[in-house]
Image (cartoon, rainbow, N blue to C red):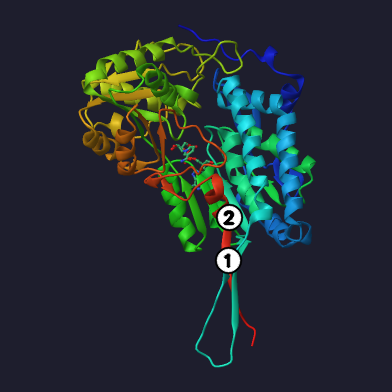
């Protein structure tokens, strides 16, 4: 089976023009030409469609210096909270006004179906709108201080202040959304930002730079430097003027970044990998649960941090659910993001395709049963067949390791206690979803699950007011919600003697 690559006649003139443009780094409100470049490949064909800058330590230094100046400049620091709100809302409006351009470029850069890109672009605007409401509501506490000093009186309060320059490092899987998850709360808190998008999908971040300028943010408040992690990313983590690193990416890189950041005692938020379980009890609405379990792993070809990569099914309905999910997997139409009817796009690059296929091959060689048809698509694109695997053991790599592809491991369980044990038995602790009509069962299980988010009778989609993040090897800190904002604020205690 061969799959067509993207049909570029579907691109708008604005998107075509953007791809043809030469791209630089956005530093201090100016575009700066890069000294080296990285080819941008369309994952549906493997062909080069554009180029981005390979940022150096010097580029990062320029961006951090600009962010540092902007943080202390009255045009940003002195801005009234309601004016910060206005700027953030303006950016949300501009994202909505440019939704077609952003979605098309996201789709050809990352490979995701256009419809999914549109949802993400709308979602990114929603996160900005949610965070825009916070600047005027950032408050501290007043504290009654009574000391046994005769005749003396005290008054104390805490103030919540922006942490300073934020280094935001994001992955390629939902590029614009991940960038906004960092930018929106950082800006709401009053921080300034240097964003380092992923080398595999940076294009929508560069459109965002134009929109940030149009929205009227003072120069230097947001700076965007593209490039490789080991060079631009690491320079950002090491920079002494960066107060906080907000990172989303793999657990391995997150641990390394955390070690580096410790040298300068930076604050760190780590949103890392996952191997999230979907747990289906025998009393669940099986039709919904089957659809939900399939969506949880096959959305964005499994390249979602909270992807439901392990499916545990109560034994009485195990065969029924396994077959149902495999049927859903086989019915998904693989295709290039722009092309009509595509439900699942390619993986991000050749390395990832090889990695994902390697996991499936090794599992089958080790005795696992491939329940799906597993037809490997032909052609130059990085398309992976959906794979649903059974007859596996809890200790297998397929169950324990994050694959980040459309690969689902299905195992049976007998009772609630076993479901909790199996669900918790990986290094990760990001998310889980539980399917059951029995409320008591659900609420006995939820506290037993060691993870940052549990979804009940639904897949775990993100919502701006709900914190996202993990425990264990899935990291610490939260994006979104009030806790997301808190990560960009620190507390100052003020003790005043009034007599
Ligand atoms: P990755 O760790 O390879 O890269 C992520 C980012 O870190 C990229 O921008 C990269 O350039 C940068 N980077 C790499 N090495 C670096 C270094 N030494 N110093 C500084 N920066 C460096 O991850 P990826 O493959 O791009 O993304 C996939 C991973 O992201 C998966 O593990 C997925 O689970 C995770 N993810 C987590 C969440 C979440 O909210 N928990 C969300 C999305 C993705």
Q: Which mark is residue 161?
A: none
If you read the primary sequence from the N terminus, does the residue marked by circle 1 or circle 2 appear first? 1
User: Badge 2 is on which residue?
Assistant: 488
Q: Foreground residue, 136 or 479?
A: 136
- Does residue 345 lie above or below 61 as drawn? above
Q: Position of residue 449 (x, y in %)?
A: 32, 41
Q: Quadrant of residue 31?
A: top right
Mark 1 near mark 2, Cβ–Cβ under 8 Å?
no
Q: Residues within 10 Å of mark 2 (few under 14, many from 20)?
A: many
Q: Residue at point 55% right, 54% down?
A: 486
| Rendered-image quadrant of the C terminus | bottom right
Q: Residue at point 69% right, 27% down?
A: 99
Q: Residues within 10 Å of mark 1 (few under 14, many from 20)?
A: few
Q: Secondary structure at mark 2?
A: loop
Q: Residue at point 59% right, 20% down?
A: 115
Q: Is residue 23 visible?
A: no
Left or right placement of residue 415 versus residue 297 in this view = left
Q: Which mark is residue 141?
A: 1
């Amino acid at each position: 089976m061969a799959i067509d690559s993207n049909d570029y006649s579907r691109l708008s003139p604005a998107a075509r023009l953007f791809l043809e443009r030469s791209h630089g780094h956005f530093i201090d409100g100016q575009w700066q030409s890069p000294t080296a470049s990285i080819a941008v490949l369309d994952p549906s064909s493997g062909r080069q469609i554009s180029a981005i800058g390979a940022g150096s330590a010097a580029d990062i230094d320029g961006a951090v210096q600009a962010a540092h100046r902007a943080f202390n400049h009255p045009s940003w620091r002195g801005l009234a909270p309601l004016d910060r709100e206005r700027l953030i809302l303006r950016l949300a409006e501009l994202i909505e006004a440019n939704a077609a351009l952003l979605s098309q470029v996201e789709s050809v850069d990352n490979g995701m179906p256009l419809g999914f890109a549109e949802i993400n672009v709308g979602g990114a605007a929603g996160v900005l709108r949610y965070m825009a409401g916070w600047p005027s509501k950032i408050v501290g506490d007043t504290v009654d201080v009574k000391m046994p000093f005769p005749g003396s009186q005290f008054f104390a309060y805490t103030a919540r202040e922006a942490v300073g320059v934020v280094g935001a490092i994001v992955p390629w899987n939902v590029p614009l959304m991940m960038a906004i998850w960092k930018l929106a709360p950082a800006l709401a808190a009053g921080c300034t930002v240097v964003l380092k998008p992923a080398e595999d999908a940076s294009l929508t971040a560069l459109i965002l730079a134009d929109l940030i300028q149009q929205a009227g943010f003072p120069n230097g408040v947001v700076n965007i430097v593209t490039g490789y992690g080991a060079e631009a990313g690491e320079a950002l983590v090491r920079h002494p003027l960066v107060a906080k690193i907000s990172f989303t990416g793999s657990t391995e890189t997150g641990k390394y970044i955390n070690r580096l950041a410790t040298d300068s005692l930076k604050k760190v938020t780590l949103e890392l990998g996952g191997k999230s379980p979907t747990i289906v009890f025998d009393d669940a609405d099986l039709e919904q649960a089957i659809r939900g379990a399939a969506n949880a792993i096959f959305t964005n070809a499994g390249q979602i941090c909270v992807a439901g990569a392990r499916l545990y099914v109560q034994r009485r309905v195990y065969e029924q659910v396994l077959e149902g999910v495999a049927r859903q997997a086989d019915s998904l139409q693989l295709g290039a993001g722009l092309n009509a009817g595509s439900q699942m796009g390619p993986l991000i690059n050749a390395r990832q395709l090889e990695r994902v296929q390697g996991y499936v091959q090794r599992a089958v060689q080790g005795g696992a049963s491939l329940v799906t048809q597993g037809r490997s698509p032909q052609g130059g694109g990085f398309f992976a067949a959906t794979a649903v695997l059974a007859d596996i053991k809890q200790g297998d790599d397929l169950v324990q390791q994050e694959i980040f592809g459309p690969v689902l491991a299905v195992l049976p369980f007998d009772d609630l206690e076993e479901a909790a044990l199996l669900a918790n038995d990986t290094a990760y602790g990001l998310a889980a979803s539980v399917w059951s009509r029995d409320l008591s069962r659900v609420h006995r299980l939820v506290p037993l699950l060691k993870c940052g988010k549990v979804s009940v009778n639904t897949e775990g989609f993100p919502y701006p007011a709900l914190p996202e993040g993990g425990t264990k090897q899935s990291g610490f800190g939260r994006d979104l919600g009030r806790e997301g904002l808190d990560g960009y604020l620190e507390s100052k205690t003020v003790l005043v003697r009034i007599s």
